[in-house]
Image (cartoon, grey):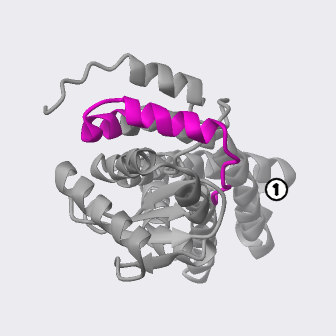
Amino acid sequence: MKRLGIFLLVNVVAVATLTLVAAVVCHVCGFDISEIIEDGSYSALFIFAFIFGMAGALISLCLSKTIVKMTMRCRTIDGSEGYAERWLVDTVRELALKAGIKTPEVAVYPGEANAFATGARRNAALVAVSTGIMEQMTREELKAVLAHEISHVSNGDMVTMALAQGIINTFVIFFSHILAHVVRSAISEKDERRRSSGGYFLHHMIVQVFQLFFGFLASIILLWYSRRREFAADEGAARLMGSPFSMVAALRRLDNLQPGVLPDSIKAFGITGKKSSIFSTHPSIDERVEALMNLQIVPGL
Protein backbone atom coordinates (compact mmCIF):
# COMPACT_ATOMS: atom_id res chain seq x y z
CA MET A 1 0.00 0.00 0.00
CA LYS A 2 2.78 2.41 0.86
CA ARG A 3 4.77 1.66 -2.24
CA LEU A 4 2.39 3.42 -4.59
CA GLY A 5 2.34 6.61 -2.54
CA ILE A 6 6.10 6.96 -2.53
CA PHE A 7 6.25 5.99 -6.18
CA LEU A 8 3.71 8.66 -7.17
CA LEU A 9 5.44 11.31 -5.07
CA VAL A 10 8.89 10.53 -6.47
CA ASN A 11 7.39 10.49 -9.97
CA VAL A 12 5.87 13.96 -9.55
CA VAL A 13 9.17 15.36 -8.24
CA ALA A 14 11.18 13.62 -10.97
CA VAL A 15 8.94 14.79 -13.81
CA ALA A 16 8.82 18.36 -12.47
CA THR A 17 12.60 18.44 -12.08
CA LEU A 18 13.26 16.92 -15.50
CA THR A 19 10.92 19.30 -17.31
CA LEU A 20 12.41 22.32 -15.52
CA VAL A 21 15.93 21.19 -16.38
CA ALA A 22 14.80 20.69 -19.98
CA ALA A 23 13.36 24.21 -19.99
CA VAL A 24 16.64 25.72 -18.80
CA VAL A 25 18.74 23.70 -21.26
CA CYS A 26 16.43 24.58 -24.16
CA HIS A 27 16.56 28.26 -23.22
CA VAL A 28 20.37 28.25 -23.05
CA CYS A 29 20.44 26.59 -26.48
CA GLY A 30 18.05 29.18 -27.85
CA PHE A 31 15.21 26.73 -28.35
CA ASP A 32 11.66 27.64 -27.33
CA ILE A 33 9.45 24.58 -26.87
CA SER A 34 6.35 26.69 -27.41
CA GLU A 35 7.56 27.52 -30.93
CA ILE A 36 7.14 23.93 -32.04
CA ILE A 37 3.53 24.19 -30.86
CA GLU A 38 3.07 27.36 -32.92
CA ASP A 39 4.55 25.56 -35.91
CA GLY A 40 2.15 22.65 -35.43
CA SER A 41 4.96 20.15 -34.74
CA TYR A 42 2.90 18.12 -32.32
CA SER A 43 4.79 14.92 -33.10
CA ALA A 44 8.03 16.56 -31.89
CA LEU A 45 6.28 17.75 -28.73
CA PHE A 46 4.88 14.26 -28.16
CA ILE A 47 8.37 12.70 -28.51
CA PHE A 48 9.68 15.26 -25.99
CA ALA A 49 6.81 14.42 -23.61
CA PHE A 50 7.35 10.67 -24.04
CA ILE A 51 11.08 10.86 -23.27
CA PHE A 52 10.65 12.91 -20.12
CA GLY A 53 7.43 11.19 -19.05
CA MET A 54 8.98 7.73 -19.20
CA ALA A 55 12.19 8.99 -17.60
CA GLY A 56 10.27 10.29 -14.59
CA ALA A 57 8.46 6.98 -14.12
CA LEU A 58 11.64 4.91 -14.52
CA ILE A 59 13.54 7.09 -12.06
CA SER A 60 10.70 6.58 -9.57
CA LEU A 61 10.82 2.84 -10.11
CA CYS A 62 14.59 2.61 -9.70
CA LEU A 63 14.63 4.74 -6.55
CA SER A 64 11.54 3.24 -4.91
CA LYS A 65 13.31 0.47 -2.99
CA THR A 66 16.06 2.75 -1.67
CA ILE A 67 13.64 5.49 -0.65
CA VAL A 68 11.23 3.06 0.99
CA LYS A 69 14.02 1.48 3.01
CA MET A 70 14.98 4.89 4.38
CA THR A 71 11.52 6.33 4.96
CA MET A 72 10.09 3.16 6.51
CA ARG A 73 13.21 2.44 8.62
CA CYS A 74 13.37 -1.05 7.15
CA ARG A 75 15.78 -3.49 8.75
CA THR A 76 16.95 -6.10 6.25
CA ILE A 77 17.20 -9.57 7.80
CA ASP A 78 18.86 -12.83 6.77
CA GLY A 79 17.35 -15.17 9.37
CA SER A 80 20.25 -15.14 11.80
CA GLU A 81 18.55 -12.58 14.05
CA GLY A 82 16.16 -15.01 15.72
CA TYR A 83 13.51 -17.68 15.25
CA ALA A 84 10.82 -15.32 13.91
CA GLU A 85 13.22 -13.80 11.40
CA ARG A 86 14.40 -17.23 10.29
CA TRP A 87 10.80 -18.29 9.68
CA LEU A 88 10.15 -15.14 7.63
CA VAL A 89 13.20 -15.63 5.42
CA ASP A 90 12.51 -19.34 4.92
CA THR A 91 8.85 -18.70 4.10
CA VAL A 92 9.67 -15.99 1.56
CA ARG A 93 12.25 -18.30 -0.01
CA GLU A 94 9.71 -21.14 -0.22
CA LEU A 95 7.03 -18.93 -1.79
CA ALA A 96 9.49 -17.32 -4.22
CA LEU A 97 10.56 -20.79 -5.39
CA LYS A 98 6.92 -21.71 -6.01
CA ALA A 99 6.36 -18.45 -7.89
CA GLY A 100 9.45 -18.97 -10.04
CA ILE A 101 11.37 -15.87 -8.97
CA LYS A 102 14.60 -15.21 -7.08
CA THR A 103 14.19 -14.80 -3.34
CA PRO A 104 13.54 -11.10 -2.57
CA GLU A 105 15.27 -9.24 0.19
CA VAL A 106 13.32 -9.57 3.41
CA ALA A 107 12.92 -6.69 5.83
CA VAL A 108 11.05 -5.75 8.98
CA TYR A 109 9.96 -2.22 9.82
CA PRO A 110 8.35 -0.70 12.95
CA GLY A 111 4.65 0.06 12.73
CA GLU A 112 1.08 -1.20 12.77
CA ALA A 113 -0.15 -4.15 10.72
CA ASN A 114 0.89 -3.94 7.08
CA ALA A 115 3.30 -5.34 4.52
CA PHE A 116 4.54 -4.39 1.08
CA ALA A 117 6.73 -5.39 -1.84
CA THR A 118 8.83 -3.12 -4.02
CA GLY A 119 11.73 -3.16 -6.45
CA ALA A 120 12.58 -2.35 -10.05
CA ARG A 121 12.79 -5.98 -11.18
CA ARG A 122 11.06 -9.27 -10.37
CA ASN A 123 14.37 -10.84 -9.40
CA ALA A 124 15.63 -7.91 -7.33
CA ALA A 125 12.67 -7.12 -5.11
CA LEU A 126 12.10 -6.39 -1.45
CA VAL A 127 9.35 -7.84 0.73
CA ALA A 128 8.82 -6.08 4.05
CA VAL A 129 6.47 -6.71 6.95
CA SER A 130 5.69 -4.56 9.96
CA THR A 131 6.36 -5.54 13.54
CA GLY A 132 2.64 -5.10 14.16
CA ILE A 133 1.59 -7.68 11.59
CA MET A 134 4.16 -10.17 12.91
CA GLU A 135 2.80 -9.83 16.41
CA GLN A 136 -0.92 -10.01 15.59
CA MET A 137 -1.21 -12.72 12.92
CA THR A 138 -0.94 -16.46 13.04
CA ARG A 139 1.83 -18.07 10.98
CA GLU A 140 -0.67 -19.29 8.39
CA GLU A 141 -2.21 -15.83 8.01
CA LEU A 142 1.20 -14.17 7.77
CA LYS A 143 2.30 -16.72 5.18
CA ALA A 144 -0.75 -15.77 3.09
CA VAL A 145 0.22 -12.10 3.37
CA LEU A 146 3.75 -12.95 2.20
CA ALA A 147 2.25 -14.95 -0.67
CA HIS A 148 0.23 -11.88 -1.65
CA GLU A 149 3.38 -9.74 -1.77
CA ILE A 150 5.31 -12.42 -3.67
CA SER A 151 2.46 -12.46 -6.20
CA HIS A 152 2.85 -8.71 -6.71
CA VAL A 153 6.51 -9.35 -7.49
CA SER A 154 5.99 -12.38 -9.74
CA ASN A 155 3.21 -10.57 -11.63
CA GLY A 156 5.63 -7.74 -12.38
CA ASP A 157 3.23 -5.20 -10.90
CA MET A 158 5.97 -2.71 -10.04
CA VAL A 159 7.18 -2.56 -13.64
CA THR A 160 3.72 -2.44 -15.21
CA MET A 161 2.74 0.34 -12.81
CA ALA A 162 5.84 2.28 -13.86
CA LEU A 163 5.04 1.80 -17.55
CA ALA A 164 1.45 2.91 -16.98
CA GLN A 165 2.73 5.94 -15.07
CA GLY A 166 5.14 6.73 -17.90
CA ILE A 167 2.35 6.70 -20.48
CA ILE A 168 0.21 8.90 -18.27
CA ASN A 169 3.15 11.27 -17.73
CA THR A 170 3.55 11.53 -21.49
CA PHE A 171 0.02 12.78 -22.01
CA VAL A 172 0.17 15.01 -18.93
CA ILE A 173 3.31 16.76 -20.21
CA PHE A 174 1.97 16.93 -23.78
CA PHE A 175 -1.35 18.57 -22.92
CA SER A 176 0.23 20.75 -20.20
CA HIS A 177 2.51 22.36 -22.78
CA ILE A 178 -0.33 22.90 -25.23
CA LEU A 179 -2.59 24.51 -22.64
CA ALA A 180 0.30 26.54 -21.22
CA HIS A 181 0.91 27.89 -24.70
CA VAL A 182 -2.75 28.88 -24.99
CA VAL A 183 -2.65 30.66 -21.63
CA ARG A 184 0.63 32.36 -22.40
CA SER A 185 -0.72 33.53 -25.76
CA ALA A 186 -3.74 35.03 -24.03
CA ILE A 187 -1.67 37.13 -21.62
CA SER A 188 1.13 38.36 -23.87
CA GLU A 189 1.67 39.57 -27.39
CA LYS A 190 3.17 37.08 -29.85
CA ASP A 191 6.31 39.09 -30.63
CA GLU A 192 6.95 39.87 -27.00
CA ARG A 193 6.51 36.23 -26.13
CA ARG A 194 9.23 35.20 -28.57
CA ARG A 195 11.72 37.81 -27.42
CA SER A 196 11.10 37.75 -23.73
CA SER A 197 12.96 35.25 -21.57
CA GLY A 198 10.45 36.12 -18.85
CA GLY A 199 7.67 34.98 -21.13
CA TYR A 200 9.59 31.79 -21.86
CA PHE A 201 9.85 30.86 -18.21
CA LEU A 202 6.26 31.94 -17.62
CA HIS A 203 5.29 29.23 -20.10
CA HIS A 204 7.17 26.61 -18.09
CA MET A 205 5.77 27.78 -14.77
CA ILE A 206 2.27 27.41 -16.22
CA VAL A 207 3.29 23.96 -17.47
CA GLN A 208 4.19 22.96 -13.91
CA VAL A 209 0.76 24.04 -12.65
CA PHE A 210 -1.03 22.06 -15.36
CA GLN A 211 1.20 19.03 -14.72
CA LEU A 212 0.20 19.00 -11.05
CA PHE A 213 -3.48 19.35 -11.93
CA PHE A 214 -3.53 16.73 -14.69
CA GLY A 215 -1.24 14.49 -12.67
CA PHE A 216 -3.77 14.49 -9.84
CA LEU A 217 -6.61 13.60 -12.21
CA ALA A 218 -4.51 10.92 -13.92
CA SER A 219 -3.69 9.32 -10.56
CA ILE A 220 -7.32 8.15 -10.47
CA ILE A 221 -6.51 5.88 -13.42
CA LEU A 222 -3.47 4.44 -11.65
CA LEU A 223 -5.45 3.88 -8.48
CA TRP A 224 -8.12 2.01 -10.47
CA TYR A 225 -5.37 -0.14 -11.98
CA SER A 226 -3.91 -0.70 -8.51
CA ARG A 227 -7.25 -2.04 -7.25
CA ARG A 228 -7.39 -4.49 -10.18
CA ARG A 229 -3.89 -5.74 -9.37
CA GLU A 230 -4.89 -6.35 -5.75
CA PHE A 231 -7.45 -8.92 -6.87
CA ALA A 232 -4.76 -10.58 -9.01
CA ALA A 233 -2.31 -10.65 -6.09
CA ASP A 234 -4.98 -12.15 -3.82
CA GLU A 235 -5.64 -14.85 -6.39
CA GLY A 236 -1.91 -15.48 -6.76
CA ALA A 237 -1.60 -15.83 -2.98
CA ALA A 238 -4.49 -18.31 -2.91
CA ARG A 239 -2.83 -20.41 -5.59
CA LEU A 240 0.53 -20.35 -3.84
CA MET A 241 -1.18 -21.41 -0.60
CA GLY A 242 -3.28 -24.10 -2.33
CA SER A 243 -6.63 -22.61 -1.28
CA PRO A 244 -8.19 -19.18 -0.69
CA PHE A 245 -8.98 -19.77 2.96
CA SER A 246 -5.67 -18.61 4.46
CA MET A 247 -5.83 -15.39 2.47
CA VAL A 248 -9.44 -14.87 3.53
CA ALA A 249 -8.43 -15.40 7.16
CA ALA A 250 -5.58 -12.90 6.79
CA LEU A 251 -7.91 -10.29 5.31
CA ARG A 252 -10.49 -10.84 8.03
CA ARG A 253 -7.76 -10.42 10.62
CA LEU A 254 -6.63 -7.18 8.97
CA ASP A 255 -10.22 -5.97 8.99
CA ASN A 256 -10.11 -6.06 12.78
CA LEU A 257 -6.69 -4.45 13.12
CA GLN A 258 -5.51 -0.86 12.83
CA PRO A 259 -3.67 -0.83 9.50
CA GLY A 260 -0.24 0.74 9.29
CA VAL A 261 -0.01 3.77 7.03
CA LEU A 262 2.32 3.32 4.07
CA PRO A 263 3.96 6.04 1.98
CA ASP A 264 1.93 6.96 -1.08
CA SER A 265 4.51 5.54 -3.49
CA ILE A 266 4.06 1.99 -2.26
CA LYS A 267 0.43 1.95 -1.18
CA ALA A 268 -0.53 -0.10 -4.20
CA PHE A 269 1.74 -2.92 -3.10
CA GLY A 270 0.74 -3.10 0.52
CA ILE A 271 -1.69 -5.65 1.87
CA THR A 272 -4.50 -3.71 3.43
CA GLY A 273 -7.12 -1.12 2.68
CA LYS A 274 -10.50 -1.31 4.41
CA LYS A 275 -12.56 1.13 2.35
CA SER A 276 -12.83 1.46 -1.39
CA SER A 277 -13.27 4.64 -3.43
CA ILE A 278 -11.85 6.13 -6.62
CA PHE A 279 -8.92 7.36 -4.50
CA SER A 280 -8.24 3.98 -2.87
CA THR A 281 -5.23 1.85 -3.73
CA HIS A 282 -7.12 -1.28 -2.60
CA PRO A 283 -10.63 -2.68 -3.00
CA SER A 284 -12.57 -3.09 0.22
CA ILE A 285 -11.81 -6.20 2.23
CA ASP A 286 -15.37 -7.46 1.69
CA GLU A 287 -14.90 -7.23 -2.09
CA ARG A 288 -11.60 -9.07 -1.88
CA VAL A 289 -13.02 -11.82 0.30
CA GLU A 290 -15.94 -12.27 -2.07
CA ALA A 291 -13.60 -12.57 -5.05
CA LEU A 292 -11.46 -15.13 -3.22
CA MET A 293 -14.43 -17.25 -2.24
CA ASN A 294 -15.48 -17.38 -5.90
CA LEU A 295 -12.15 -18.85 -6.97
CA GLN A 296 -11.97 -22.42 -8.14
CA ILE A 297 -8.62 -23.79 -7.00
CA VAL A 298 -7.65 -27.45 -7.28
CA PRO A 299 -5.14 -28.33 -4.50
CA GLY A 300 -1.75 -29.31 -5.84
CA LEU A 301 -2.21 -27.56 -9.22
Q: Is residue 96 above or below residue 13?
A: above
Location of residue 254 in the rendering, given as x and y in whole percent from the top left corner: 59, 41
Numbered label tally:
1
**Would residue 109 be found to the left or right of residue 209 on screen?**
left
- Which residue is located at x 39 percent, y 46 percent? 140
What residue sits right under mark 1 in the picture?
A: 189
Q: Is residue 48 above or below residue 140?
A: below
**Would residue 88 be found to the left or right of residue 31 on screen?**
left
As rendered, which of 61 and 253 lies closer to the eye?
A: 253
**Which element type, helix, strand or loop, lies under badge 1?**
loop
State the image quarter where residue 282 is shown.
top right
State the image quarter where residue 238 is shown.
top left
- Which residue is located at x 77 percent, y 72 percent? 196
Q: Amino acid at mark 1?
A: Glu
As rendered, which of 191 and 283 lies closer to the eye?
A: 283
Location of residue 43 in the rendering, given as x and y in whole percent from the top left corner: 42, 48
Location of residue 158 in the rendering, given as x and y in whole percent from the top left corner: 40, 54
Q: Is residue 146 above or below residue 287?
A: below
- Which residue is located at x 86 percent, y 52 percent? 187
**Would residue 178 be found to the left or right of residue 232 on screen?**
right
Range of magenta residues: 235-263
Instruction: Verify whether residue 252 appears in magenta.
Output: yes
State the image quarter where residue 293 is shown.
top left
Secondary structure predominantly adopted by residues drawn in magenta: helix
- The reply to whether residue 40 is in sight is no
The extreme right residue here reads 187
- The reply to whether residue 156 is in sight is yes
